[in-house]
Image (cartoon, helix red, strand yellow):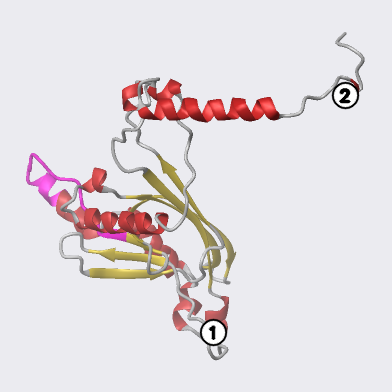
Amino acid sequence: MSSFPGSPKLLKGGIVLIDPATAQVQRIIALQYNPESLSRTLQVQGAGEGGDRSEALRLKGPAVETIKLEAEIDATDEMEAGDRTAGEAGIAPQLAALETLLYPSTGQLTTNHMLSSLGTLEILPMETALPLFVFGQNRVIPVRVTEFSVTEEAFDPNLNPIRAKVSLGMRVLSIDDVGFTHKAGSLFMSYLQQKEGLGAKVGVGRRVLSVDDVGFTHKAGSLFMSYLQQKEGLRAKAQGGTLGALGLTGIP
């Protein structure tokens, strides 16, 4: 496909698998088409969820962030171009690349089975490669894939899927999950620092703290009281209405 001169290069989102110890890239999974939308949810880890006023501004750790997206995979163009892999297997290889993110390898399973057969008392859970969700140069995020579903929508004569819609759910790994020394921990800190840098460029909405949250003696409490008094002062300047304007002659 030809592009117009001077048109920006279209980047693709995807997942990069790296060795968590050496950071060596093991596999790159590029999405065929970027998703039309990306859903992110952040759940605050507040220390004052129980109503203790002294804990209203305290956080136990980073927010728990989840990411969800839907992506389409289609082998039509490749099949028309005579691509051998697409002709023989459709999009099964692309689906397998995503699905195996949720499995330990056959080698790991075999090793653990052999250790169990030899009577090994303690067998550690198998560690997989570290997935990094990449969505532009400013978002390289360590994640754990938590959800995966696929709807296969079309098939070739051999029943190989040739078009599908994939739904992917991921949880961002933070220092609460892996610590500071883990590669995912350092990548999370870089991701958080980028957020802080972007946040410094624009105002951020916040929830107003009242005396119910912090009490009267806290600085936030006295500021809230001033804020409320200003509201009351503005209310006193508002022109009052009449019952007649509301179509009433009295209160029944």
Kind of element beneath mark 1: loop
Task: Report if residue 89 lies within the magenta region.
Answer: no
Q: How crowded is mark 2: few (under 14 residues within 10 Å), some or many (20 or more)?
A: few
Magenta: main secondary structure equals: loop
Three-letter amino acid code of the residue under disc 1: Ser
Residue at 15 percent across and 60 percent down: it is 21
Vertical comparison of 102 with 80: above or below? above
Q: In which quarter of the image is the N terminus?
A: bottom right
Q: In which quarter of the image is the C terminus?
A: top right
- Asked if one can make out residue 142 in the rendered structure from this viewpoint, the answer is no
- Spot occupied by residue 206 in the image (x, y as percentages of width and height): 47, 40
- Residue closer to the observer: 186 or 200: 200
Q: Where, by quadrant of the figure, is residue 136 drawn?
A: bottom left
In space, the residues marked 1 and 2 are separated at their CA atoms by 60 Å
Q: Are marks 1 and 2 in contact (CB under 8 Å)?
A: no
Span colored in magenta: 113-131
Disc number placed over residue 7 in the picture, else none: 1
Vertical comparison of 236 with 178: above or below? above
Residue identified by numbered label 2: 246
Three-letter amino acid code of the residue under disc 2: Leu
- Spot occupied by residue 234 in the image (x, y as percentages of width and height): 64, 30
Residue at 11 percent across and 48 percent down: it is 115
- Tell whether 220 sits left or right of 176: right
Q: Which of marks 1 and 2 is in front?
A: 2
Q: How crowded is mark 1: few (under 14 residues within 10 Å), some or many (20 or more)?
A: few
Vertical comparison of 179 with 252: above or below? below
Residue at 20 percent across and 58 percent down: it is 183
- Spot occupied by residue 9 in the image (x, y as percentages of width and height): 48, 81
